[in-house]
Amino acid sequence: GGAAAFVAVDIGASSGRVIVGRVLGGPAPGGRVRGEQLVELHEVNRFPNGPVDVGGTLHWDVLRLYQGVTDGLRAAAGEIHTRGDVLVGIGIDSWAVDYGLLDADGALLANPVHYRDSRTAGVSDRVFAQISAADHYSVNGLQTQPFNTEFQLVAAARSALKAAAASLLLIPDLLGYWLTGKQVAEVTNASTTGLLDVRTRDWSASLLDRLEEAFGGESMVTFAGLLPRVVEPGTIVGPLRPAVAHALGISGAVPVIAVGSHDTASAVVAVPASGENFAYISCGTWSLVGLELSEPVLSEASREANFTNELGVDGTVRYLRNVMGLWLLQESIRTWKAAGLPADLPDLLAAAAQVPALTTVIDVDSPEFLAPGDMPARIAEAAERTGQTPPRSQAETVRCILDSLALAYRRAVRQASELSGRVVDVVHVVGGGVRNELLCQLTADATGLPVVAGPVEGAALGNVLVQARAAGVLTGDLAALRAVGARGVALARYEPSDGVGHVPEPHWAVAEHRLVTAA
Ligand code: ADP
Ligand code: LRH
C-alpha cells in the first residue's frame, strides 16, 4: 500500500483497456529511499472495439467505449482503495484522426465515423487540387492517408451535422470531456489531423484559412471555429466532474491529465531504449515504424516516401511510416471464423512457422487492404496480380502476411534512417505484436538489426509515465522516464544472425526486388 497509482485508458482499434500503473520505489517519508523507481502495470478491464456498419457507414460505438472506460475506472478505484494506494491521475489515449462533433450545449451530435469508412475516397485529390500536397507537407509534415481528419472534414463539409456543430473533439479528448466537462485538443493527436503546424505545435491559421476558402461554402460554422485550444502532454485537463466521481466511487478531486493521447505517441514514450540510435515498431492493428527526432524532416523525398512527422511528448517528432500491420491478420481471422473455419491465433502462428519463408510476398501498404472484408481473398488476388503463387492454406496466408510485414519493416527502417540521417542500431517492438515471436524474429532477420521486444502494453506504460511526471511522482526527461519504464517490463531479444527459423539476408533482398519489379 501507499503507492501512487495512475489509471491509463488505452483504446486501440481492436480493443480498449483500462490499466492501473503503480509507481514503486523512490523517496519514502522521512527522507528514506525504497530502491529504484519502477512502474507495475495491472489490467482491470478490457473490452472489444471495432467498426459498426450502420446504413452503409462504418462507425465507432463510442458510448459503449465510454462504458468500458467507466467500468474500468470503477474497478480501478476499488482496487486502489483496497490496496491502500492513492489514485493520483487518469490519462486517456486512443487511435488517432477520428472525432466527435458536439453542439453548443456540448451534446454529441452523432456517432464518430470510423477511419476505414469509404466516405473519404478521392477527397485527398480534391483537396490537393486546391492546396497542393507540397504546401500541406511544408506546414503539417503529415503523411497522406485517405482518413486524415482534414479529409474527413472535407468529405462532410456540406453536411447538416457540420452546420449544427460547435466543436470537434478527437476521441481521447471526447472521453476526457465526458469525464471532466473540459474541452481541449491534445497536441500529439492533433498532429494527425492535418490542420496543425508541425513547427509551432499549434493549429495552422494559414492552412485553415485556405481550407475554409476552398471548401467552407456559405456555412456559418468554420473549420477553425470547431477546434479547441491545443494542450501539451502533462497539462491538467481538469478534475473529474463531481457526479462522475461519485458514480465511480472515487473520492477527492482526481484530475484527468493530458498524456500523449495519440496511442502511438504514448507507445513511443515507453520504448525501453537508451541513447537515440533506435527505431521502433509500435505493433498492433497498425505497425508504426520509425524514429524519434527533435526536428521534422520536410524534404521532398520524405513527402514522396509518405513519411509522417507526427508530434511526440517533450517537443519530439515521431518520424514514421504507417505499415498496414496486424490488421491483415485480424481481418483474415475474422473472415475464416465467419466461414466456420478454426482460426486460433497461436495455432495459426505455429503452422505458419512450418511454411517455407518468402514464398509469396505482397505490398502490405497497398490501399486495397484498408477496408474491412475478405482479407485472404484480397491477398490471393494481390499475389496473382504480381505473378506469384497465391497462398493456398491458412498457414500459407499467415506466413505471407508475416513475411510481407517484415519486408515492409525492413524498407521503412532503412528509409527512415536514410531520409533523416539518423543511424539505427536496434529495433524496438512494442504493442500486441511483441507476443508474435515469429514476427519478431523475421523483423530481426529482415532489418539485419537486433530486435528488442516489449512492453506489450506500451501505450498504457507511456501514458502512466507522462502522468506520473506531471504529478511530480517521477522527474526528468524522456530518457529518465524510459529508464523507469524499462525496469518494470520483461524484454525479449532477437538477433538477426540466428534464432529458430532464421531467414538469411539474401532472401530478403531477392523478395524486395520481386515486389519492386512487380509494382
Ligand atoms: P490495438 O492497440 O491496435 O488494438 P494491440 O496492440 O492490442 O492492438 O495488438 C493486437 C494484436 O496483437 C492482435 O491483432 C494480435 O495479432 C497480436 N497478439 C495478441 N495476442 C497475441 C498472442 N498471444 N500471440 C501472438 N500475437 C498476439
Ligand atoms: C494506431 C493509430 C495510428 C494511426 C491510426 C489511425 O492505433 O493511432 O498511429 O495512423 O491508428
Image (spheres, rainbow, N blue to C red):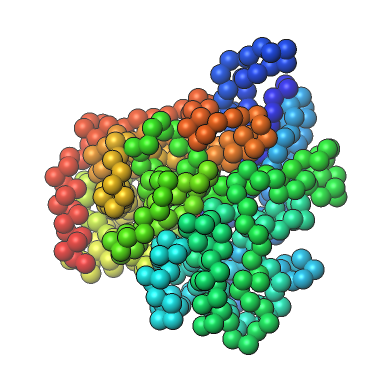
So how many labels did they put on this image?
0
Quadrant in the rendering for residue 474: top right
Which image quarter is the C terminus in?
Answer: bottom left
Residue 331 image point, x, y percent:
44, 58
Q: Residue at x 44, y 33 (%)?
A: 272
Q: Which quadrant, please, contains the N terminus? A: top right
At horizontal 75% and vertical 36% (from top left) the residue drawn is: 77
Depth check: give the residue in front, 327 or 210.
210
| Residue 280 spot, x, y in % from top left | 39, 43
Query: Looking at this view, is 443 or 223 the one in front?
Result: 223
Above or below: residue 91 compared with residue 300: above
Q: Residue at x 61, y 19 (%)?
A: 25
Q: Quadrant of residue 87?
A: top right
Give how far across and how far down residue 378 sits, in percent.
34, 66
Q: Is residue 268 above or below residue 195?
A: above
Is residue 95 in view from this perspective? no
Name the residue at 56% across, 69% down.
205
Along the horizontal axis of the image, is 82 left or right of 439?
right
Picture quarter containing residue 341? bottom left
Is 223 above or below relative to 282? below
Relative side of 404 to 14, left or right = left
Task: Give the answer, above or below, for where 17 lies relative to 296.
Answer: above
Q: Residue 371, position in %: x, y? A: 44, 67
Looking at the image, can residue 315 be seen?
Answer: yes
